[in-house]
Amino acid sequence: MPKKAINPDGLFKANFYSQGVRAGNTVFIAGQVGAVAAGTVAGGGNDFKAEAKQAMENIRKVVETAGGKMSDVVRLTCFMTDMGLGKDLYPAIEAAFPGVKPAVTAIVVKSLGSLTYKVEIEGTAVIE
């Protein structure tokens, strides 16, 4: 099955991974943090709601660049540095999916790839 790298404009470009990979109708979305195009944390690192909303926006960019829409997302795995952040993360997820919600797993971790971020969300979409 052919694979296609998905690297939307405005998201971090790395030599060692893609922001997403489309294989057939399935899109595997790499962990998205709350980074804005300039590479800084949305909300300046002091506004977790803004960070969570930006992470969801970055997921949308990957899915749409792959030819899909947010309603095609079927699974999310959320890594956060404090379980108390869920109260602000879950509304951001709910707002991004007005219809059928994806399956969601939340995992608390000690830290992420950068100490600047408090949440990272990866996912899977199946484009119809």
Image (tube, grey):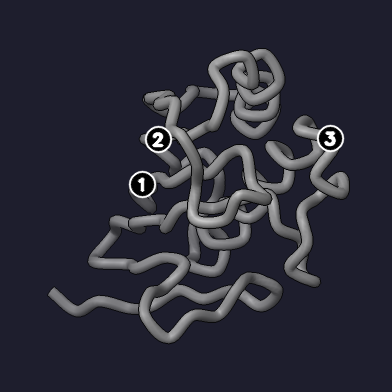
Residue on which the image places disc 3: 47
For the question of whether residue 36 can be seen, the reply is yes
Q: Position of residue 87 (x, y in %)?
A: 67, 13
Q: Earlier in the sequence, mark 2 or mark 3?
A: 3
Q: Give the side of residue 86 with respect to residue 48, left or right.
A: left
Q: Report the residue that reaches farthest toward the bottom.
A: 15
Residue located 76% across and 33% down the image = 48
Residue on which the image places disc 1: 124
Q: Position of residue 65 (x, y in %)?
A: 55, 69
Kind of residue sitting beneath label 3: Asp
Residue located 45% across and 74% down the image = 6
Q: Secondary structure at mark 1?
A: strand
Kind of residue sitting beneath label 2: Thr
Residue on which the image places disc 2: 77
The reply to whether dot 2 and dot 1 touch (C-beta < 8 Å) is no
Q: Earlier in the sequence, mark 1 or mark 3?
A: 3
Q: Residues within 10 Å of mark 2 (few under 14, many from 20)?
A: some
Position of 40 relative to 75 (above/below): below
Q: CA distance from mark 2 to mark 3?
A: 21 Å
Residue located 70% across and 57% down the image = 35
Q: Position of residue 26 (x, y in %)?
A: 29, 56
Q: Position of residue 99 (x, y in %)?
A: 57, 24
Position of 16 relative to 123 (above/below): below
- Quarter-wise, where is residue 105 in the image? top left
Kind of residue sitting beneath label 1: Thr
Q: Residues within 10 Å of mark 1 (few under 14, many from 20)?
A: many
Q: CA distance from mark 2 to mark 1?
A: 9 Å
Q: Residues within 10 Å of mark 3 (few under 14, many from 20)?
A: few
Q: How many marks?
A: 3
